[in-house]
Image: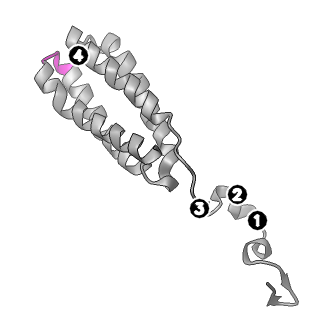
Amino acid sequence: MGMLAQILSAALGGWLMAGPGALSGPDIALINDRVVGPLVILIGLSAAHEIMRPLRWLNVLLGLWMLIAPWALGYSWTGMLNATAVGVLLIVLGSIRGPIRARHGGGWSALWKPLALIQGDISDGKQTT
C-alpha cells in the first residue's frame, strides 16, 4: 500500500499543475500550485521506493501548506476547496508507511560499527562462518 499511496500523491501533484488553470483563481494561487505540484510529484515518485520512503513526510508538510495557502494567499472559493482537498489527501497518503520488506544498509549508525561486526567474526586474520 505504501508504493500505491506515493504514486497517488504524485498524481495529486499532476492535478495541482493542471487543475488550477481550469478552476480559475488569482494568479498567486496558480503560481503556488504550479510550484508545489512538481515538488509533490518528485517526492511522491521518489518515496514510492522502499529505501526512500521517509521522504513521504515532506509531502505531509506540503499538504499542511496546501491547507494554509488558501487563507495566506487569498484563493477563490473553488481554489480553496481544491487546495483543502489536495492538502488533506496529501497528509493522509503521506502518513501511510507501507510494509518493510528488507533492511537496507543500516543507515548512519553503520558508520560507527566496528568493521569486524560488519564482515563477520574475525579471529587471527581469518574469517570464520
Q: Which amino acid does label 2 sit on?
A: Ser
Could you tell whether 54 is left or right of 87 in the image? right
Q: Do the residues labelled 3 and 2 touch (CB within 8 Å)?
A: no
Question: Where residue 40 sits in the image (x, y, percent)?
Answer: 34, 38
**Magenta span:** 24-28
Query: As drawn, which residue projects farthest toward the front?
Result: 1
Q: Which of marks 1 and 3 is nearer the N terminus?
A: 3
The circle on residue 104 is 3
Inspect this view and state whether residue 76 appears.
Answer: no
Question: Where residue 6 sits in the image (x, y, percent)?
Answer: 40, 42
Eye-nearest disc, 2 or 4: 4
Q: What residue type is labelled 3?
A: His
Q: Do the residues labelled 1 and 3 touch (CB within 8 Å)?
A: no
Q: Are marks 1 and 2 in contact (CB under 8 Å)?
A: yes
The circle on residue 113 is 1
Return the residue at label 2: 109
The circle on residue 7 is none
Answer few, some or many: residues within 10 Å of disc 2's Cα (few below 14, many 20 plus, some between 14 and 19): few
Label 1 secondary element:
loop
Look at the picture and state if 120 lies above or below 98: below
